[in-house]
Amino acid sequence: MRPGSLLFLGLWIRHGARHRLLAILFGLILGGACPRASTGGIQFDAFVGYDGLVRPGSWNPVVVEAFNEGPSRGAVVEVSSDRMGAATVRVPIELPAQSRKRFVVPFFCGGTGVECRLLAEDGQVLTQRPSGQIQMISWNAPLLGSMSDAPQGGPSLMEGIVGEVELDQPRVVRLQVEMFPDSALALESLSSIYVSPSKASALRERQVASLLQWVACGGQLVVGLDRPGDLASLPWLRTVGVPEPQGVGVLTESEMVRWLNGESWNPGFALRSHSGKVATLEDRGTVDPGATGWAEPMQFLRFRTGRAEEGFGLRTPWMEVRRWGRGQVLVLGFNPEREPVRSWNQRSRFWSHLCGIPPANRSGTPSDERVLTGLDILLADLVDTRQVRKVPISFLLVLLVVYLAIIGPGDRWLLVRIGRPMLTWLSFPIYVLLFSGLIYLIGYRLRSGQTEWNELQIVDVIPRESGASSLLRCRTYGGLYSPVTGSYPLDLDVPLGGVRGELRNLFGVRLDSGRVTTTLGPRSTSAEVQASLWMKNLVVTEWIEEGQPPIEARQERDGRYKILNRTGRRMGPVWLSQGGRMQVVEFIEAGETFEWGPGTESRPLVEVLEPHLNGISESLSRREQSFAADPDTELSAHASVVMASGFTASVDTSIPEDRAILWPRAFSLSNPLDSGSLVVQAWVPDPGVIAPLNRFSAVRRKRESLLRLIVPPSTSSPALSSP
């Protein structure tokens, strides 16, 4: 019984008729103020991040679990940011009687807390998980996921090698098979993942598919084999190209120490956290043989030493490395959870070296003291409407001087001239009304316009085997301008896609101009953007899908490359970069092939990028300005600015040291360029290569695409497999 009902009954019995009326009113008030505690027999729980740890400015998993003890019913799971619901994800579910459902929701964390609620179909809140304080790491700190057989035998990383700031320290998080995401987008915050053979064999088909997609998008997967039959129990490793072990060898302490002290190991997976330089012996220090605590020689499964290791500067028969898209699969010929590795006093150094964790940044401004600026600011400036103009500060100053002159000396001179000084009580409100109307008219003329939707599509093309479809890692930056307040629907024909608002910074004011509500369906993803009057809204959509490659590139035996345009329309400009040099191709017609290779005229990369880096700085500052010196200023050659932004190392050196850009995960093209790969960037003008996302009518609209393709130095090598 409700508390209000109990109090009402007590007053009814103990008092007379006059007090009974007060008892009725008081009972109704208390009864309405006390909601029902019952959730209809549903147990609800949510687990945010990886073992309670999240990476801000990136996609993280939210594992939701619901157990229905009552009758069958429908419900909606809602995951939202705790900042006034700026970003909300909803998942409609069916809960049969006596059933348990567990699924993963990809959620973008902008440096704030996360709230999880279970709603009835009519919108009533059944139960919710308190927001609480979530534990975070730095946006670029190394994060290793571990699915080991025992927590004590799993990976461990060295502390203090990245910096002195606690958020920058590398971390290891434990992953469970039952809660492993079936969405590659939800794995994006992880740099590397270690999986034991027993855990790998327990993964479901959808989990394996998401794991391999994550590797293709830039992750590093580490698998340690315990017995020769382990590889046979993992057929998906054979699809990656991992060969059968060739016998058994003995691994000694001296060989492991030689590998730890070597400088040749420099893994090049795209999700690796970089400090801007390769680790050297001076940064890491050396290990003395005989003082590492290595108990005894260890047997390992021997892999053949061939091009796979030569491509990484190695000859290690106890390790097999296979490139898979922009990431790599690393198979160890021994179980790192067993002795002597388990009790080895260099185990943390081994895992840190294996995952390519950079040394401390001993120069420059510490990461916690820099102003972090989201890349969204740059790309938002490129898709912003040009209907809205900013008032020059000089015009506002002149208007202010005129206003003060009229309400001050002008008003006094006029009233004295007509001999009615007491009329100032009437003239002053008139001046205020006139200037208020003038300011509104100016704002209306500057802000009013037509509904506009502009899309910038950045597509990373990750080739598969010849003749098959490719993996497409897509990012769409949509600029919405609305002359009225309203709701604008978006639709994406991919399940478990991600839709978010603009991210300008972390741990500070998040200036999202519109609220985004995403609904995840079994076959598609839809969203609604609540746009405000005369405001610029940026909507970012991210997803991974399989499809026909819009561009192809391959290397011939003579070292030349052939680039084929399969978009069905002219594309250009096209940037071809390799080895610190670049050639800018004006255009490539639809269906045509362009050849590029040794002897082709090219220019130094720095020389080509220099003028466009200034455009990046201008865009970052213009987006943050409230006023403009020139209302008609527009960014010229914005295609080249977007293409230049992929070379993150060059961009970072062009901005002040006290500022840093929040680069999206695996967005940088600097590492594949340093490894000798050919980097192809092709601009496709309106209407782009991807179908429009908007499901509303826009009077003004534009779609442009940037295709990015990485070709390793030798595609004929069996080590350079494609996903």
Image (cartoon, helix red, strand yellow):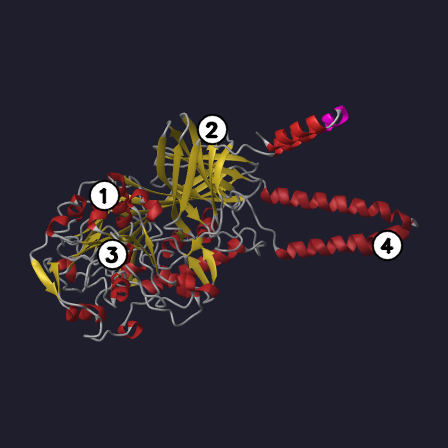
Q: Position of residue 386 (x, y in %)?
A: 51, 46
**Left or right of 295, for residue 643:** right
Q: Quadrant of residue 540?
A: top left
Circle nearer the N terminus (4, 3)? 4
Task: Report the front residue among 636 and 314.
Answer: 314
Circle nearer the N terminus (2, 1)? 2
Q: Position of residue 643 (x, y in %)?
A: 36, 54
Q: Secondary structure at mark 2?
A: loop
Q: Which residues are magenta?
A: 17-22
Mark 4 touching mark 3, by CB under 8 A?
Answer: no
Q: Secondary structure at mark 3?
A: strand
Which class describes the residues within 10 Å of circle 1: few (<14), some (14-19), or many (20+)? Answer: few
Circle nearer the N terminus (1, 4)? 1
Circle nearer the N terminus (3, 2)? 2
Q: Which residue does the numbered mark 3 point to in the structure image? A: 678
Which class describes the residues within 10 Å of circle 2: few (<14), some (14-19), or many (20+)? Answer: few
